[in-house]
Amino acid sequence: MAEVDDKNPENVDGKFYVDSQCIDCDLCRETAPANFERDDEEGYSYLFKQPETAEELELCIEAMEGCPVEAIGDDGDA
Protein backbone atom coordinates (compact mmCIF):
# COMPACT_ATOMS: atom_id res chain seq x y z
CA MET A 1 0.00 0.00 0.00
CA ALA A 2 1.29 3.45 -0.92
CA GLU A 3 2.52 5.65 1.91
CA VAL A 4 1.67 9.37 1.78
CA ASP A 5 4.79 10.15 3.84
CA ASP A 6 6.95 8.44 1.20
CA LYS A 7 5.54 10.04 -1.96
CA ASN A 8 7.84 11.09 -4.76
CA PRO A 9 8.65 14.81 -4.56
CA GLU A 10 7.38 15.65 -8.06
CA ASN A 11 3.77 14.73 -7.23
CA VAL A 12 1.37 17.66 -7.32
CA ASP A 13 -0.61 18.26 -4.15
CA GLY A 14 -3.88 16.44 -3.88
CA LYS A 15 -5.56 13.12 -3.30
CA PHE A 16 -3.54 10.90 -5.68
CA TYR A 17 0.23 10.36 -5.57
CA VAL A 18 2.99 7.85 -6.36
CA ASP A 19 5.43 6.81 -3.66
CA SER A 20 9.01 5.52 -3.75
CA GLN A 21 7.92 1.90 -4.24
CA CYS A 22 7.40 2.67 -7.96
CA ILE A 23 9.31 0.23 -10.19
CA ASP A 24 8.82 2.28 -13.39
CA CYS A 25 6.63 -0.36 -15.04
CA ASP A 26 4.76 2.25 -17.14
CA LEU A 27 1.28 0.92 -16.30
CA CYS A 28 0.01 4.19 -14.79
CA ARG A 29 1.43 6.28 -17.64
CA GLU A 30 -0.24 4.02 -20.19
CA THR A 31 -3.54 3.91 -18.28
CA ALA A 32 -3.80 7.60 -17.35
CA PRO A 33 -1.33 9.57 -19.51
CA ALA A 34 -3.11 12.85 -18.76
CA ASN A 35 -2.14 12.49 -15.10
CA PHE A 36 1.07 10.48 -14.74
CA GLU A 37 4.56 11.23 -16.07
CA ARG A 38 8.00 9.68 -15.73
CA ASP A 39 11.00 11.21 -14.02
CA ASP A 40 13.64 10.16 -16.56
CA GLU A 41 16.59 10.84 -14.28
CA GLU A 42 15.28 8.86 -11.31
CA GLY A 43 13.28 6.24 -13.24
CA TYR A 44 9.86 6.41 -11.58
CA SER A 45 6.40 7.80 -12.16
CA TYR A 46 4.66 10.66 -10.42
CA LEU A 47 1.33 12.44 -10.64
CA PHE A 48 1.75 15.71 -12.51
CA LYS A 49 -1.97 16.58 -12.59
CA GLN A 50 -4.79 15.57 -10.26
CA PRO A 51 -7.85 14.21 -12.08
CA GLU A 52 -10.22 16.97 -13.17
CA THR A 53 -12.91 14.97 -14.94
CA ALA A 54 -14.88 11.82 -14.16
CA GLU A 55 -12.93 10.01 -16.89
CA GLU A 56 -9.55 11.06 -15.48
CA LEU A 57 -10.68 10.01 -12.00
CA GLU A 58 -11.76 6.61 -13.31
CA LEU A 59 -8.42 6.12 -15.10
CA CYS A 60 -6.41 7.13 -12.02
CA ILE A 61 -8.36 4.61 -9.95
CA GLU A 62 -7.75 1.96 -12.62
CA ALA A 63 -4.02 2.74 -12.56
CA MET A 64 -3.96 2.58 -8.76
CA GLU A 65 -5.78 -0.76 -8.69
CA GLY A 66 -3.52 -2.19 -11.40
CA CYS A 67 -0.20 -1.03 -9.93
CA PRO A 68 1.82 -4.22 -9.33
CA VAL A 69 3.62 -2.81 -6.26
CA GLU A 70 0.77 -0.67 -4.89
CA ALA A 71 2.83 2.52 -5.27
CA ILE A 72 -0.18 4.71 -6.10
CA GLY A 73 -2.21 6.13 -3.24
CA ASP A 74 -5.43 8.08 -2.99
CA ASP A 75 -5.19 9.36 0.57
CA GLY A 76 -3.08 12.45 -0.04
CA ASP A 77 -3.93 16.06 0.70
CA ALA A 78 -7.36 16.56 -0.80
Image: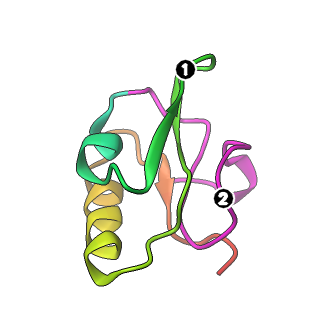
Is residue 16 shown above or below 32?
below
| Callouts 2 and 1 close, C-beta under 8 Å | no
Residue shown at 43% from the left, 56% from the top? 35
Question: What is the x, y in percent for residue 67?
Answer: 33, 46
Residue 6: percent from left, percent from top: 71, 47
- Would you place residue 41 above or below residue 33 in this image? above
Q: Earlier in the sequence, mark 2 or mark 1?
A: 2
Instruction: Check disc 1 and report the residue beneath it.
Output: 40
- Amino acid carrying label 2: it is Val
Position in image of residue 1 (x %, y %): 49, 54
Amino acid type indicated by mark 1: Asp
From the image, tell me which residue sits under label 2: 12
In percent of the image, x 27 and y 64: which residue is there?
Answer: 59
By what rule are the colours in the image chosen? Answer: rainbow
Query: Of helix, strand and loop, which one carries label 2?
Result: loop
Q: Main secondary structure of the magenta part?
A: loop
Q: Which residues are magenta?
A: 1-24
Pinpoint residue 74: horizontal percent, then vertical percent. 51, 69
Q: Quadrant of the C terminus?
A: bottom right
Q: Between marks 2 and 1, how big is the CA–CA gap?
A: 17 Å
Please check the rendered image and state whether residue 9 is part of the magenta-colored stretch, yes or no.
yes
Identify the image quadrant of residue 60: bottom left
Q: Is residue 26 left or right of residue 9?
A: left
Element class at badge 1: loop
Q: Is residue 1 visible?
A: no
Which residue does the image show at 67% across and 48% down from the upper left?
7
Asked if one can make out residue 28 in the rendered structure from this viewpoint, the answer is yes
In the rendered structure, find residue 70 and report the number of the disc placed on it: none
Residue at image x 55%, y 20%?
40
